[in-house]
Image: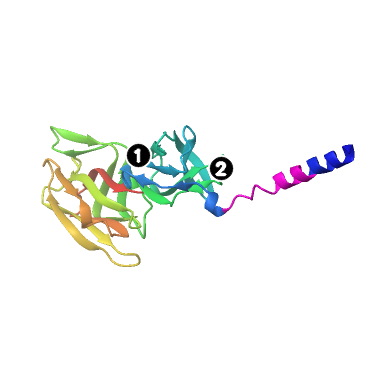
């Protein structure tokens, strides 16, 4: 009798073990996502929000950033009683970064992953921090230099100084949209006639096309030049040229570009 009871118990236990089927893809969490901005200045944040189902209240929705072939946690938020989450994602680096939202496995459900999304980090960069392309002619970089009148000079840090027929090209790689800078003749220039500072853009492997010609002369306040939007948005490179006489010196003060690089 005792042997029959033990056999019956083992039979019931064995039956119980096979009643729970292995989790399948249909048992995975479903995670949605939407992002408040896809282009933002480095140092600012965007908001990522979405829904997790089945609802996993008080558990974590984890925002991950792709680094190489791996995914690294950068933000997270607890899922509320409605299955929603709202995470603040800091943008710490320039360039395009790929993200996703992960809900880890729990309560018999496999992990769920949202669709990926891209956020671009943008920043202002001093022009002289960009890589150059081709020959550089009669160009020097001053940690601090002046433009404008000898009585009331304006000091810039840094200053791109260009002598007669000076020329330099910078690689943008189609990652910059805005150019900004002041241009004028440096106070030490010995020529009082009008000089011309030329700004151009060029495609990869191509020649520069002029987009700006700014006339300046000695002891004149520097002209403030701002070019935004489509002017350099598709440009592979940016070229600065000085159409100047012997003894003249043109300077670009505070020249910078707005880039996702």
Q: Residue at x 37, y 47 (%)?
A: 119
Distance (Cα) linking label 2 and label 1: 24 Å
Q: Which mark is residue 217?
A: none
Say above or below: 250 vs 211: above
Q: Is residue 14 left or right of residue 236?
A: right
Q: Quadrant of residue 63?
A: top left
Q: Position of residue 66 (x, y in %)?
A: 48, 48
Q: Which mark is residue 47?
A: 1
Q: Residues within 10 Å of mark 2 (few under 14, many from 20)?
A: few
The chosen color scheme is rainbow
Q: Does residue 257 belong to the magenta stretch?
A: no
Between residue 1 and residue 146, name the one nearer to us. Answer: 1
Q: Is residue 221 left or right of residue 51?
A: left
Q: Residue at x 46, y 40 (%)?
A: 55
Q: Position of residue 17 (x, y in %)?
A: 71, 45
Q: Quadrant of residue 220?
A: top left
User: Which quadrant would the N terminus be assigned to in this image?
Assistant: top right
Give the magenta-colored segment's residue range: 11-24
Is residue 124 among the parts visible in the rendering? no
Between residue 7 and residue 26, name the one nearer to us. Answer: 7
Q: Which residue is mark 2?
A: 105
Q: Position of residue 85 (x, y in %)?
A: 40, 37
Count the numbered circles shown. 2
Q: Residue furthest bottom?
A: 206
Secondary structure beneath disc 2?
loop
User: Nearer the N terminus, badge 2 or badge 1?
Assistant: 1
Proximity of marks 2 and 1: CB atoms separated by less than 8 Å: no
Q: Does residue 13 belong to the magenta stretch?
A: yes
Secondary structure beneath disc 1?
strand
């Amino acid at each position: 009798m005792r042997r029959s009871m033990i056999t019956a118990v083992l039979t019931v236990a064995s039956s119980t073990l096979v009643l729970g089927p292995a989790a399948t893809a249909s048992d995975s969490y479903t995670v949605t996502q939407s992002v408040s901005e896809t282009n933002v200045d480095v140092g600012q944040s965007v908001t990522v929000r979405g829904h997790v189902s089945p609802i996993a209240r008080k558990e974590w929705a984890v925002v991950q950033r792709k680094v190489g072939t791996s995914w690294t946690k950068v933000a997270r938020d607890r899922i509320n009683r409605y299955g929603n989450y709202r995470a603040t994602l800091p943008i710490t680096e320039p360039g395009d970064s790929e993200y996703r939202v992960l809900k880890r496995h729990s309560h018999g459900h496999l992990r769920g992953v949202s669709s990926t999304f891209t956020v671009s980090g943008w920043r202002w960069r001093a022009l002289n921090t960009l890589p150059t392309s081709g020959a550089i002619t009669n160009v020097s970089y001053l940690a601090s230099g002046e433009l404008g009148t000898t009585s009331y000079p304006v000091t810039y840090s840094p200053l791109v100084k260009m002598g007669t027929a000076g020329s330099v090209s910078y690689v943008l790689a189609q990652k910059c949209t805005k150019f900004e800078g002041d241009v004028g003749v440096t106070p030490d220039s010995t020529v009082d006639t009008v000089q011309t500072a030329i700004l151009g853009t060029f495609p990869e492997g191509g020649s520069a096309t002029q987009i700006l010609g700014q006339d300046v002369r000695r002891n004149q306040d520097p002209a403030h030049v701002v070019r935004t939007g489509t002017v350099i948005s598709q440009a592979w490179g940016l070229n600065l040229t000085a159409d100047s006489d012997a003894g003249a010196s043109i300077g670009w003060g505070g020249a910078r570009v707005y880039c996702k690089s």
